[in-house]
Image (spheres, helix red, strand yellow):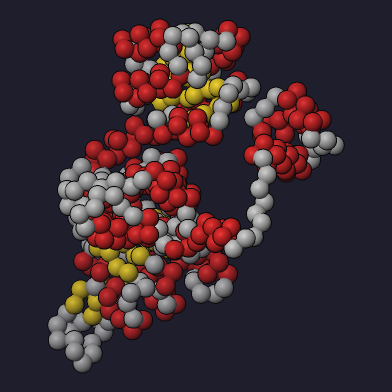
Amino acid sequence: MDILLVEDERSIRITLRDDLERAGHRVTALSDGAKALEVLEKRRFDCVITDIRLPGLGGMDLLKAVKNLSPSTEVIVITGYGTIEQTVEAMKAGAYDYIQKPFPNEVVVERVARMDQLRVMGEELERLRSRLEGKDLSRRLVGRSRPMLLVLDQIGTLASSDATVLLEGESGTGKEVVARAIHALSPRADRPFVAVSCAALPENLIEDELFGHEKGAFTDARKIRKGRFELADGGTLFLDDVDDLPLPIQVKLLRVLQEREFERIGGEESVSVDVRVIAATKVDLREKVKEGEFREDLFYRLNVLPLRLPPLRERREDIPLLVQHFIQKYGRGREYLVPAEILEAMERYSWPGNVRELENHVARAVAFAGENRLLERKHLLPPEAFSLPEIAGKAGEEGDSPDLRPLAEVVKEAERAHIQRVLAHTGGHRTKTARILGISRKALWEKMKDMELD
């Protein structure tokens, strides 16, 4: 990566530059914020690493200038005088990361390596979205978090194969959107994509829905009816909630996957099909196999190319993008605003219903907004998302005595507990502990002495 390092402390500037260059990056090192801005106005960098306190121009002003000149340039802010308020301000201004001094150079090098990986994946994402342009899918694949970028990267790989895909993920994680994207990027894109929900159909209708029937197969069978497998011939069949298939149908599905042929209900002749199957499950099929509720041989037939979709709680940084996406979807061209404190509360909430639950709340907030352009918290979040603060407030009103102590004391107590946990994890190995904590061994030793940790 092309990196601009702006640090007025000479020892940090030189050693960090050398370590970044040893890692394979091209580094321009400066000590003055104003000079850095002059360089930025003439040249684009992949990454800027800047101290907060600089001569000429402060690091926060430099951060804002970078984002104005080149929004795609990532910025890592480093400081020896960090506060929570300053961290929040830097992140809101677009900082990729915020690192407090003192730090081992390896921490910065590792963060830059991770950033570089995400940058490459982001470029692949844009290529993937351009291939999906015009198919109403590129706008539905929302997210730039690491878990989501990994999924999007795998979509492109899986699409080139013709093997069976098993999508694993909780309800509401977007399994059908991913299945449609795989189909749209595959050589079968101009052939049918047929979706069937195995959970939505009564057990006595599933076989007819999947395989069809012959004329006269039963009382109301007045003509031949093609099932979903035949309708998907040459294309892709998406079996959603495959974990809900009854065992007798699992047997017939296994044969289709093995032989690519089946008989309609009431028929004697085999029907051959050329279909790629993408199955989706909301539960761990391995557990269903152990419980005897899912055939082991069918599981292995489906689990050729597995792809796990992360729940929303594992990609919280995508929530602002998703909120904006759904506002555009339901706002009918009107602009709506979500206050920063509400957006932060939405990022803290676990969203058990995942993206689908988030979408429903945004749609409800827009519907209730009327002429108001400011969306309300009571519509954007379920009651349980803010019940704890309300309970705390009531407790204070009723005269309970909460734990009110100086912030420094609370922070030190939390820091001591965390160091103890990491020491326990490493078996007391101080070098490993310091590496995990992102501090030097000397700094760990001083903290342990200060906190009277043996």
Q: Residue at x 44, y 57 (%)?
A: 351
Residue closest to the far left: 223
Q: Position of residue 144 (x, y in %)?
A: 38, 40
392 and 293: which one is in front? 392
Please give the name of the residue rendered at 32% of the width and 77% of the height, measured from the top-left corner: 201
Q: What residue lies at 67% left-to-right and 36% top-to-bottom?
A: 408
The percent coordinates of residue 432 (x first, y second) are 72, 32
Q: Where is residue 44, by image quadrant?
A: top left
* 395 displayed left or right of 132: right
* Residue 253 position within the rendered picture, expressed as x and y whole percent measured from the top left: 37, 70
**Residue 111 in view, yes or no:** yes
- Quarter occupied by the C terminus: top right
In the picture shown, does residue 33 fall above or below 233?
A: above
- Is 367 placed left or right of 89 in the picture? left
The quarter of the picture where residue 446 lies is top right
Viewer can see residue 179: no
Vertical comparison of 391 with 227: above or below: above
The answer to which quarter of the image holds residue 433 is top right
Q: Is residue 448 left or right of residue 77?
A: right
